[in-house]
Amino acid sequence: MEVALEDNNLMENILPPDEQEIDVELEAKEKKYLRGEGANLESLKDKKLKTQLASREKLYGKSAKAAAKIEKWLLPASAGYLETDGLEKTWRIKQTDIAKEVDILSSRNQYDIVLPDFGPYKLDFTASGRHMLAGGRKGHLALVDMMNMNLIREIHVRETVRDVAFLHNDQFFAAAQKKYAYIYGRDGTELHCLKERGPVARLRFLKNHFLLASVNKIGQLHYQDVTYGDMVASIRTGKGRTDVMEVNPYNGVVALGHSGGTVTMWKPTSQAPLVQMQCHPGPVSSVAFHPNGHLMATSGKERKVKIWDLRKFEEVQTIHGFHAKTLSFSQKGLLAAGTGSFVQVLGDGSGNYSRYMSHSMVKGYQVEKVMFRPYEDVLGIGHSMGWSSVLIPGSGEPNFDSWVANPFETSKQRREKEVHLLLDKLPPETIMLDPSKIGAMRPSRRKDKPTRGEIEAEKEVAVEAAKGVEMKKKTKGRNKPSKRTKKKKEMVENAKKTFPGEEQGNVAGKKRRIGEVDAAELPASLKRFARKN
Amino acid sequence: MGGLKRKSSSSAKSVAKSKKKKKGPHLPNSILKVIADQKRPLNSDEEEEEDEIDSDDEHGGDLYEYEEGVPEEESRKNNRYDRHDNYDYELPDDFEDENVESEDDDFDGGNSENDDDDDDDRHTRMLQSLTGMPSAAFQGESKSKPVLFTEAYPEGEFNPTRDVLEGKNVLTEEDFLAPLEGKPGYHKTSKQIARMRKDTKHVVHAPLPKPQRERLERKAVIGLVDGEFSKWVHLVKKNREAPTVYFNQEVDLGYSTVGAIASEFQPRTEFEKKMASLLNDSEVSEAHRDDGARLLELNEVSMEDHIKKRDHIAKIRNLLFRHEAKSKRIKKIKSKTYHRLKNKDLKKSSLGALMDPEMAKEEAMRQEAKRVEERLTLKHRNTGKWAKRMVRLGLNAKYDATRAAIAEQLQMNANLSRKMHSMGDGSSSDESDDEEGLNDGSDEDTPSRLIAKAKEKTLKTMEDDEVPNAGLMSLPFMARAMKKKNEEANEEAKRALEEYEEWENSGGENSKKPVSVSGRRVFGATAKVEAPKESKKDSDNFYDNSDSDNDMAGVEDNDMEDVRDNASPARNTGTITETEKFDDAAGNQASKTTFDVAMFASGSWKKMTSCKNTESKKESKKTRAPISQSQDKKGSRDEESEDSESEAEEMVDGVLASASKETFEIPSQAELINRAFAGDDVLDEFEKDKEEVLNQEVPKPEKPVLLPGWGDWSNVQRKRGISKRMVMEHEAEEKERKQKLKTRKDARLKHVIISEKVDKRAEKLHTTTLPFPHTSKEAFEHSMRMPIGPEFNPSTVVSELNRPEVVKKTGVIIKPVKFEEVNPNDEVDDEHPRNHQKQRSKKKTGKRQGKVKSK
């Protein structure tokens, strides 16, 4: 409250230029937290509702203001960035150059782990970025604490491992192995064997819904609730085998890339895809979603990367001559793409994605998976010879929210969080393209009534048509002009009759009037029979 | 006539109008006579009164008072009579009156009339003398001469005469005063009038017309009411618009401490008042405040009080002594009868039971015994001789007393045999009783019925051995094997049947035997069964009695029930042994199970087709068995090798994949072209897909077709083709479909299919109607856009966002709205003035800072 009061005082005074600037900045932030504009209250007729909504709007404003202020003044860290002078280009800067400039703690994040035996590695980070899971194709599973580079657990399953995924925290992870998918505990014990899914190609975990989604070799998409183990949905995509699968973090919709160049989006409550998009003429090799859920990046085998706006389902940008085997968006919206032994990071400068940084590894390394580490400016690269970590300034969110994900979580906090997550678990039907519509009015299945204007327009057209009708030439005195005009009039009247509308009201009025007139005109002896109104 | 009547009634009041004499209607003489006769005595009093009031009216009133039915001619009903008849007598008197009254009248008319009057007078006088009746009775008679009419209707207050209307004959004060001249009081009145004329100030104007007056009144009232109500407007507005209405401002929960309650104490009763007077006695308090020496003085007891107290003590002591003496005497009594009776009395009163725990125990024991006895004998269950007789004779229905007695007995029975909750062991014994009863029942019907059942079953299974005509079982060699098996089974069944018949013939004697033998008796071709049976426990002798019993064993057996049921048809194919074995295995050797199960399963192939509900279970068992076998056989080495093999395969696959995956080298032009061509195909396919989806979601209308044979009899009809109406309808449908397709989200996006299927499960997440105060969808959805939970808002706002509309403490009485001055310019204060809350919120802000940010 105090802060608010101070602010009011400030507003009254004439502000010095610095503070004016701050004010503008704050306003921009406030707008972000207001989530769109309030309704137009002027159009409301109910005064009570109007004032109530106005007071509510005021509270929202207060809340947004508080949030903006906290963001402005209290968040400790700011995002990193690369600053170049003159003709220097950001993509020419190498990791070695960066290493010289950054602090020791950050420079420790540049490393290569060489594990040549167990071949291309898949990576996954927990939501907080504290833990990393690496799964070697040939059966090597490693759980690493990234904070102190401590190998928590390493197991060898002696089977092909196609994909790995953390469940809601570092305590559990799933691995798609040769025949079945398995769930392991943090200490490497096998907890479950998920036989129902068959040989799984890709695994993804939907955090808010506690669903483990997987697509198997025969193109079946499965959703399994990991809280009580029920198979929520089992969908046959009918598009053949695929190993391209990604979850839209904004709405929980799962996207699959197919060999026909289509990307399909799915939810567990419907057997048909929500959206099918023809993205590429050739097979889709990878898909990635921007954290705000509005952008999707796809790459096709025809050496193109496309960026799509998911609100309009339109292509925003095409990046030519670049084939990405794997794509990943960072929290701040950088897009990393890996091919061969080359990784490129695209930055979102002025609406268009363009080269920001690039990193090439030793020749012969095959990049399998790139993934940004949350809350750190680090990009993890899983490749055929182990995994590497490079610094990408400005990729991670600088300030973590301990209520959302806390890298420094204690075990007690973790347990508390787990309970909260379970309590806040969303049912599978909340997965939809636009989750902001939840709680709103149900979209009407069809257009209920044509508007008055439409009716009028249609009527006019019909009348015109009736007028334009060519009359037959009749004989025997039926072709008189008077008859013709009469007939024409009749036709126009008929055309008008087919459009109901105000006439109904008029008819009722007419009826009433007729009754009244009757009562007045009746002879005295019959008056008593007249209808009383 | 009406006009006349009015006049007569008002004649008493208006002095000015009652002038001269009135002429009544022209009535026949006879009627007049009758009227006069009848009226006279009745109206004599009235007449006198009237005479007193106005002397000049003579007796005219009498006649006009009479309410005569209107003659037909006059009522003008149906217009049967000419109108001009009325001119004779309708209005002349009024007319005349008017003329007489106005003094401006010309003399000639007056003279001629006077002459007429003279004639009239004479005539009436003559009549009077002849008939002996008053002249008034004949006054109207002579009115037969023509009269001049200038008005077509009677004069009245609503029908002014013409001259009044024209303004010629306006009445002035002088007109009224003139006749009074010379009379006493005239002078005074004229003076007053003169004064009034001069004084224009105090002129009272004529009242406004009613509607105008009322309008003015309403205006005034509206102003008043508006003022009164508009005072409240701000208050009401404030209350309506407040996001929260509080009813916890003046909470008076009364006293919180004992001291506070005590301080408000008011002595009410006599005793309290006395105490209060003593406590508040100034003398006493003073004495306390001093040294206390005076307290002794005040403590004086009067002689009277002392004596009273002493007497009371003496009385009490005396009573005590007497009681003691009495008990001593009773104790000395040696008669046993007396003591017994006394004790009995004590017990009966049940007071003793309450007093003495031992007695209570005894009582309880007795009650328990009674209960047991009741349950054993069922004495009170209308099983007695008397009760039976009563019921038989129907006396219980006849006599109330009997019925009551029987009901009482039943009640007693219910009471006694009801389970006591307090007794733990009672219930268990009950249960065992029940079980016993059940066993008894089953024991009774074993012999004959069970045999019959077994027979029935065997027959049934013999009948329904059909060969399945699909799947594995339909293969020829399987069929052959099945046939063989069936034959065997049939033979066995026949044998069993024979045996059953034998059994039946031998009767119940046989059935008793095995029970007495105590071991088991085995029937039929069960030679090989006997060996494993040795291992059976003795405890299950119940279904070791006989094989037929075993068929029924499903009733009792819990563990193996379903398995046994499955096997029931297989039993006659010699699998009785198997099931038994199965039992054994389940009981003793766990290791053997799998094998047995496998066998069992193979034995009951046939069953699989017929009974579906057990299918899955069996199948699982079957599958498990081979697996386990294979495990036994192969061992772990094989599996490993298999694994390694597959792994190697995969690895090759992986290597291959990695090798084939393109690297940095740019693909050749040819390859690119290839891909482009491949892409074209893909696009086409997608379009087809889209078409399909659209057809599914917005189905195409059916084309109009004729039923074959209808409407194509002749060439003409054929030429004409499908009727216009159908074509039109089809076109309309097509149009509608096009419209629908147009409104789809993916209408303009060639490369996208957006499903518009309605997700029924997600529908519950939307509202179907707008919640109450909202009327516009847009406003509602905008108001919903912000989350209101504590995760998204600072705590200061959260409480306000989520506060209920009405905050009320329990027990607060909500009073009607009180008027208070409200400044209309004040904004609605939505912050509740509660300081402690604010402080708390301030503390929390620091903690929450991280929270709000990344939402």
Image (cartoon, coloured by chain):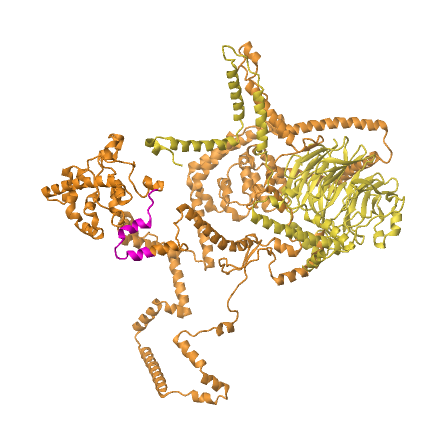
Chain colours: A yellow, B orange
B527 or B304: nearer the viewer: B304
The image quarter in which residue B38 lies: top left
From what the image shows, is residue A337 above or below residue B791?
Answer: above
Residue A411 in sight in this render: no
Residue B522 at x, y percent in the picture:
51, 40
Total number of numbered discs in the rendering: 0
From what the image shows, is residue B318 above or below residue B148?
Answer: below
Could you tell me which residue is drawn at 47 percent across and 31 percent down?
Answer: A507
Q: Report whether B658 appears left or right of B59.
A: right
Residue A498, magenta (yes or no): no
Could you tell me which residue is drawn at 81 percent across and 50 percent down?
Answer: A80
Residue B485 at x, y percent in the picture:
57, 30
Could you tell me which residue is drawn at 16 percent across and 37 percent down?
Answer: B28
From what the image shows, is residue B513 above or below residue B417?
Answer: above
The N terminus of chain B sits in image quarter:
top left
In the image, the segment drawn in magenta is B168-191
Query: Farthest residue toward the left?
Result: B130
A387 or B725: nearer the viewer: B725
Q: Report whether B506 appears left or right of A82.
A: left
Residue B696 at x, y percent in the picture:
63, 29
Residue B108 at x, y percent in the picture:
24, 39
From what the image shows, is residue B280 above or below residue A45?
Answer: below
Residue B822 in sight in this render: yes
Q: Report whether B667 appears left or right of A277.
A: right
